[in-house]
Amino acid sequence: MEQRFIKKENNPRLLLFFAGWGSDEHLFSRPVEDGYDYLLCFDYRTLDFDYSLLDGYREIRLLAWSMGVWVAGQVLTGKDYPWQMRLAIGGTPFPIDDRKGIPEAIFRATLENFSDAALVRFRRRICGTAEQVKEFLSHAPYRPVPELHEELQALEQYVRRPSAPFVWDKAIVGTGDKIFPPANQREAWRGTAVIEKDVAHYGGALFDRLLSGEEAVWTRH
């Protein structure tokens, strides 16, 4: 796993973001709230995690997207950190699951038929609209297709592990999500506070607000 500080100013608070499959710092190098450092996690070909990077923070705001929701649960379960809030978006603790995640046949088809053209189609699906595709491509990840295929293969093996009993405070469900079906997300998040947003799997403006701290879901109310 890559862990990269996008902002490190020895602030007392940390924004810890587990991005989705295929991400990198180019997609999520965005402004964050004053008073926070910002650590981005991506590239899940391995799940190795350097916990020392979290030392010394008196408050940690956790955000996880897509496959990053499952990864965060795996590496953080059982760890006692000063969570300000744990927020999941566009993913579930059951990433390949016909009822609570990505339907298995769809994931399998993506894995077996992965190519440059398949990546283009995937990015269109996560964005939903031509305008959102344009926004995504303005800071698209710089990762080669073979590497992304390796990451997909690794995740397919890793998710055979049992779901981790990690507790999330809130989950955002995009009603236009074409990757994790909204109905499956609702089923997976029974018992967790759910906020529904009129967005696709990826919403650039929503991520801007989440990372900058402007999005109201960060409040405890």
Image (cartoon, rainbow, N blue to C red):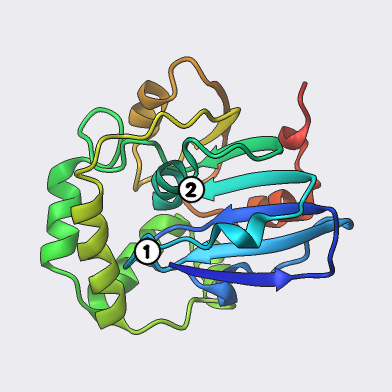
Please tell me which residue lies in front, 139 or 9.
9
- Quadrant of the image occupied by residue 171: top right
Image position of 80 (left or right of 200) = right
Measure the alpha-carbon separation of dots 2 and 1.
23 Å
Residue designated by label 1: 44
Residue 145 pos. (x, y %): 29, 81
Q: In this view, does 57 lie above or below 37?
A: above
Q: Is mark 1 on a helix, strand or loop?
A: loop
Residue 62 pos. (x, y %): 63, 45
**Three-letter code, disc 2:** Ala
Q: Quadrant of the N terminus?
A: bottom left
- Residue visible at 12% across and 46% down in the picture: 105
Q: Which of marks 2 and 1 is in front?
A: 1
Q: In this view, does 11 lie above or below 162?
A: below
- Quadrant of the image occupied by residue 215: top right
Q: Quadrant of the C terminus?
A: top right
Find residue 3 and name its label.
Answer: none
Label 1 Cα neighbours within 10 Å, binned few <14 / some 14-19 / many ≥20 = many
Residue designated by label 2: 200
Q: Which of marks 2 and 1 is nearer the N terminus?
A: 1
- Residue visible at 64% across and 54% down in the picture: 16
Q: In this view, does 84 lie above or below 135?
A: above
- Residue visible at 54% across and 44% down in the picture: 199
Residue 76 pos. (x, y %): 50, 44
Label 2 Cα neighbours within 10 Å, binned few <14 / some 14-19 / many ≥20 = many
Residue 92 pos. (x, y %): 40, 37
Residue 13 visible, this orientation:
yes
The residue sitting at the top extreme is 191
**Three-letter code, disc 1:** Tyr
